[in-house]
Image: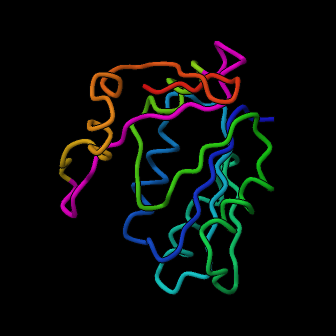
Amino acid sequence: MPTVSVIVPNYNHARYLPRRVESILAQTYRDFELILLDDGSTDESRSILSEYGNDPRVKIELNERNSGSTFKQWNKGVGLARGKYVWIAESDDYADPTFLERLTEVLESDETIPLAYCQSWSVGEGGATQGLAGLHLNALDWHRWKRPFVTEWKGAGIFLF
């Protein structure tokens, strides 16, 4: 059983898929399965996803018709997941190679932390970073969002880095 199940729900994101999938397969943390979902795309998504079908870490699930809901795809992916942890990795994003290593290390270090998340960079059409996404968080408490922290939520710790 893998430690992490990575779920990539996709609908018509063919132009982003190679970078997204490659950024997952290149993770320094290797104990994961990759569940690629397609929700009835009408672009070249299915063809791109099929290129990864020979990797033993990859499972591909294709819907014949669009479900109309990203959340239905998340639920489908979680239902297929075998890992202890789940990462829902949206199809139009990509990740730093150490993403899974850093978050999994935190989750494994303290069993009271059921959720870990991180800041994201906003990336423009040309691929250039445009600053941190979620700059609205600065208005809440800009010092807090600039460093890792653990906070309490309903009796459990949540980690941000």
Is 20 covered by the magenta stretch?
Answer: no
Which quadrant holds residue 18?
Answer: bottom left
In the image: residue 77, left or right of residue 48: right
In the image: residue 15, left or right of residue 51: left
Query: Is residue 142 placed above or below 17 in the rendered structure?
Result: above
Give the residue drawn at x 50%, y 74%: 45
x%, y% of residue 145?
Answer: 34, 28
Give the residue drawn at x 53%, y 24%: 159
Give the residue drawn at x 76%, y 38%: 83
Give the residue drawn at x 52%, y 19%: 150
Query: Is residue 142 placed above or below 56 in the rendered structure?
Result: above
x%, y% of residue 102?
Answer: 50, 23
Is 120 covered by the magenta stretch?
Answer: yes
- Choose between 36 and 78: the one closer to the eye: 78
x%, y% of residue 7?
Answer: 63, 53
In the image: residue 81, left or right of residue 132: right
Which quadrant holds residue 16?
Answer: bottom left
Query: Is residue 104 placed above or below 51 in the rendered structure?
Result: above
- Choose between 109 and 16: the one closer to the eye: 109
- Choose between 47 and 159: the one closer to the eye: 159
The magenta span reads: 107-127
Q: Quadrant of the N terminus?
A: top right
Q: Quadrant of the C terminus?
A: top left
Count of labels shown?
Answer: 0
